[in-house]
Amino acid sequence: MIQLEERTDVTPLCPHCESPQEKIYYQSLPTRLGRRYIYFCKSCKKTLGVSHRKGFWMG
């Protein structure tokens, strides 16, 4: 089983440009069935991930 541990003494690095990620930019992408968010590096602007937030009626 994978264990999770919160760490506040380290700064994550961008997997593309390896710059420290002290601030991550995001952009909202509205869709018909909720809202998606795209997260990207503030230095190289490459995508770090995309998430999906369901609408209130979808739970």
Image (spheres, helix red, strand yellow):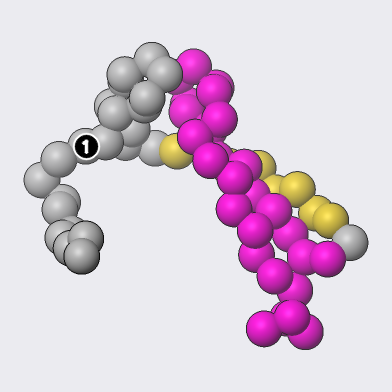
Callout 1 secondary element: loop
Residue of label 1: 11
Name the outermost residue toward the left: 9
Which residue type carries mark 1?
A: Thr
Q: Residue 31: x, y in percent?
A: 84, 56
Front-most of residues 20 and 34: 34
| 10 Å crowding of disc 1: few (<14), some (14-19), many (20+) | few
Left or right: 46 as drawn, with respect to 8: right
- Along the viewing direction, whichever of 8 and 36 lies nearer the viewer: 36
Q: Is residue 9 visible?
A: yes
Q: Which residues are magenta?
A: 33-59
Q: Position of residue 4 (x, y in %)?
A: 20, 62
Residue in the image at 47% along x and 28% along y: 41
Tell me if residue 23 comes above or below residue 34 in the rendering. Answer: above
Check if residue 28 falls in the magenta segment.
Answer: no
Q: Residue furthest front?
A: 1
Task: Let me know if residue 43 is in the magenta part.
Answer: yes
Name the residue: 65% across, 64% down: 53
Image quadrant where residue 19 sits: top left
Q: Please provide percent x and percent y for residue 3.
A: 18, 63
Residue at (70%, 70%) from the top-left corner?
Answer: 54
Q: Is residue 57 left or right of residue 18?
A: right
x 32%, y 36%: residue: 22
In this picture, is 44 found above or below 34? Answer: above
Which quadrant does the C terminus fall into?
A: bottom right
